[in-house]
Image (cartoon, helix red, strand yellow):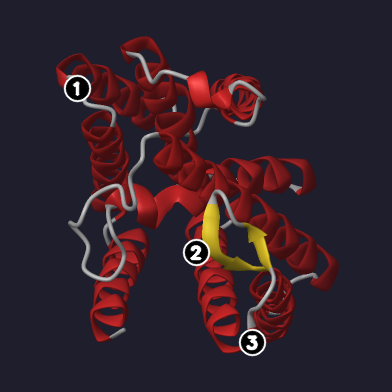
Amino acid sequence: MPKRIGTGLIYAFSLFASLFFVPNLFIFIAFILALAAVLELHHMSEKTPILIILCLSLYFGSCFFFRNNENFALSLILVFFSFFTFLLLILFSRNQQTLKFTLPLVTSISLFYISIGMSFLIFIAQNQKYEGSIMLGFVFLIQWSNDSFSYLIGKWIGKKIVFPAISPKKTLEGYIGGLICTLLFALFIGYVVDLDYFQVMTLAFLICISGNTGDLIESKIKRLLDKKDSSQLLPGHGGFFDRIDSIILSVPISYLFLYLIY
């Protein structure tokens, strides 16, 4: 637990400090997080990642160049959710045990799921229609609070395992308790910073549901690859893919929601 807390605090401080005070550094950190997760996926599947490093660099460079172009971002939303649907079908199909993580599949997950998902950190943070850094900070706080509440409540009173074959430590009590506590926390944030309660609660609900789904997808990938953690680089958390699995899905959904209300 001390290692988990210490690593989490360093991670959170790095993101918030760069987000609010050094925006270009934050963009670089987003790229590094995505790259680290992609390299971990390649390592777990025993695939060579040389080409993907170049592709990822060029992609994030283009995201930085088009960071205020809504049409570009919305096109990526379409690509992301199209591939997300495909990924769900192949990961949870009946013949999933025969699924082979070939280089084309690993590359596709790296580019169309991890990389595009993480690039929306840039599109929210740099958005000029609203206070992007504040909104992204809210997304982070809600996602982390949901993860923490779910973990603590699950450890405290969790009994009913929701997905025993995929994530044996995740309980129904943890999911529901984490959602309720996080929504109350979001309501408190909305009161403090004077945000619309309905919008705050709706966004928080979407973040919780999508974050849990993203965590489930990464757990499924690890089970199919017979891995417990994506790596051991982050004490108490596993690897970078383990750390960002929730926000890969919740950030694009948050961007789409903010686009619709603003």
Instruction: Give the residue type at disc 1.
Output: Pro
The residue closer to the viewer here, 206 or 123, is 206
Task: Judge whether 206 appears above or below 50 on screen.
Answer: below
Residue at 31% over, 13% down: 103
- The vertical placement of 255 against 46, above or below, is below
Compared across the picture, whether 208 is left or right of 214 comes to right
Residue 247 as seen in the image, left or right of residue 194: left
Q: Residue 262 versus residue 58: which sits nearer the camera?
A: 58
Q: Residues within 10 Å of mark 1 (few under 14, many from 20)?
A: some
Disc 2/disc 3 C-alpha distance (Å): 26 Å
Residue 172 is situated, as x and y percent measured from the top left of the image, at 71, 69
Dividing the picture into quarters, in which one does residue 192 lie? bottom right
Give the residue at the far right of this rendering.
198
Residue 224 in percent (x, y) is at 44, 35
Quadrant of residue 63 in the image? top left
Residue beneath disc 2: 140
Query: Residue 80: percent from the left, percent from the top?
Result: 57, 26
Q: Residue at x 54, y 21 (%)?
A: 72
Which label sits in the foreground, 1 or 3? 3
How far is disc 1 from disc 3 in space, using C-alphas? 42 Å
Helix, strand or loop status at disc 1: loop
* Residue that protrudes farthest toward the top in the picture: 104
Local crowd size for mark 2, using a 10 Å CA cut-off: few (<14), some (14–19), many (≥20): some
Instruction: Give whichever of discs 1 and 3 has the lower sequence position.
Output: 1
Badge nearest the viewer, 1 or 2: 1
Picture residue at 27% right of the left edge, 19% below the top: 58
Image quarter of the N terminus: bottom left
Place residue 81 in its image quadrant. Answer: top right
User: Mark 3 packing: few (<14 Cα in 10 Å), some, or many (20+)?
Assistant: few
Q: Amino acid at mark 2?
A: Phe
| Circle 1 residue | 49
